[in-house]
Every structure is written in structure tokens, then in C-alpha cells.
Image: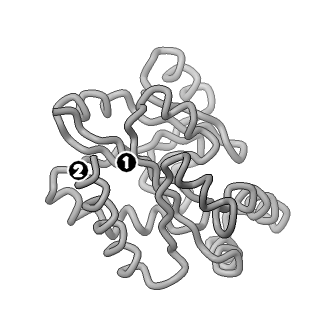
Amino acid sequence: MQGRLIYLMGPSGSGKDSLLQAARAPLEAHGCRFARRVITRSAESVGEDALGVTPADFQRLEGGGAFALSWRANGLAYGIPLEIDDWLSAGQDVLINGSRGHLDTARQRYPDLLAILLQVDEAVLRQRLLDRGRETSEQIEQRLARSRSFTVVGGASAATVAQEHICVLDNSGPLPHTVTRLLQLLDETRQCA
């Protein structure tokens, strides 16, 4: 039986890394694997447990077919190692930290992926971005504008979410609540599959 690709996405600062870390143990206990992204961000950057590489190394890896998925966003390059295909073929679920802008391309390669959009109230998001201190004020405003373009709350947007098969997970509140809801969501979607 083929494993399921769980494609977690959300704006920078929405808490994806914190959620992945907090949900790791219970998900691993159920056989879920976590793919470590390759990013052209310095290893000194605080946050995600990713492999930092130079742009030249990233291009070499990408050109050599090392990635199942790769994309560019916010001035960085991101890659998901090809080993996820082996894990999926072995029947294991695989959770990746994906990109909202790359979802359509990811779905072409993995048509049955489970897309989960992590959202957070804009005021909370702004404060998280300020607190982590990685970006300038201008870069934060660019990230917030990009986040608004992907927000799927309210009226017609809810229909679009259902049509595109995207599960929305709010992370504006306490992290343990979001972890519990993520685990429930994965159980619910597995029963529907």
C-alpha cells in the first residue's frame, strides 16, 4: 500500500516548524516520516531543522536529480530529498514542509497528497516575524502581503478550499491545541481515503 504525502504549508512565521517539532513524536509513533528540507539559507539561521547549502550546491543537487520537489520563494531555494519516494513506496506516510506557491506542481507529481494550510491571524503573524528577527521591516511586509494572497477564510474562499482539497488548520492559539487538531485531521482524512 502506497504511503500518503502530507503537504504542510503556510506563511513564514505561521508556526510550521514549531508544529512539526511538537507533532513529531506522536506522528513517528504511527510510522510517519519527516523529510528534512534543503535550503539556501545559512546554517546559522534560527528555526527549521534544515540542511543549509550554498546556491551553487543547491543547483548542483537539483541538476543531479537529488530532489523530489524543489522551488524558489522569498529569495531562497528549497528542495525535498528524493528519498521520500522510497518511503512512500514502502507504505509510510511522509510529512513535508511545502510551499503554497508550489502546491499545483507538487500535486502533478503526487496527485493524492493531503494539503494542509496552516493559517494564523495577521497580527499574530506580524509579531512572530518581528520576534524571530530574521527579516527587515520591508521583508516582513512583503511576507504579510504574500500571506494575504493565500488566505482562504470567508465566503467564496471556503468553496475554493473545498474544491482544491485543502484542509485549513488555524495556529493562532496555543500550540498544543493545533497539534491535537492536526492529529485529528490526519485521522479524519485517512478514514475518508
Q: Position of residue 70 (x, y in %)?
A: 54, 31
**Quadrant holding the N terminus:** top left
Q: Amino acid at mark 1?
A: Ile
For label 2, the SS is: loop
Residue occupied by mark 1: 6
Q: Is residue 6 above or below residue 18?
A: above
Q: Quadrant of residue 77?
A: top right
Which dot marks residue 32? 2
Q: Please tell me which residue is depicted at 39% across the width and 32% down the height of the picture.
A: 81
Residue density around tag 2, few if under 14, some if 14–19, many if 20 or more, within 10 Å: many
Q: Is residue 39 above or below residue 66?
A: below
Give the image's coloring scheme: one colour
Q: Is residue 62 above or below residue 40?
A: above
Marks 2 and 1: in contact by CB < 8 Å? Answer: yes
Q: Is residue 85 above or below residue 101?
A: above
Residue density around tag 1, few if under 14, some if 14–19, many if 20 or more, within 10 Å: many
Q: Please tell me which residue is depicted at 74% across the width and 62% down the height of the picture.
A: 148
Q: Position of residue 43 (x, y in %)?
A: 51, 50
Between 73 and 182, the residue placed more toward the observer is 182
1 or 2: mark nearer the eye: 1
Q: Please tell me which residue is depicted at 50% across the width and 63% down the height of the picture.
A: 168
How many numbered circles are shown? Answer: 2
Left or right of residue 80: residue 148: right
For label 1, the SS is: strand
Q: Position of residue 153 (x, y in %)?
A: 64, 67
Between 55 and 105, the residue placed more toward the observer is 105
The residue sitting at the top extreme is: 64
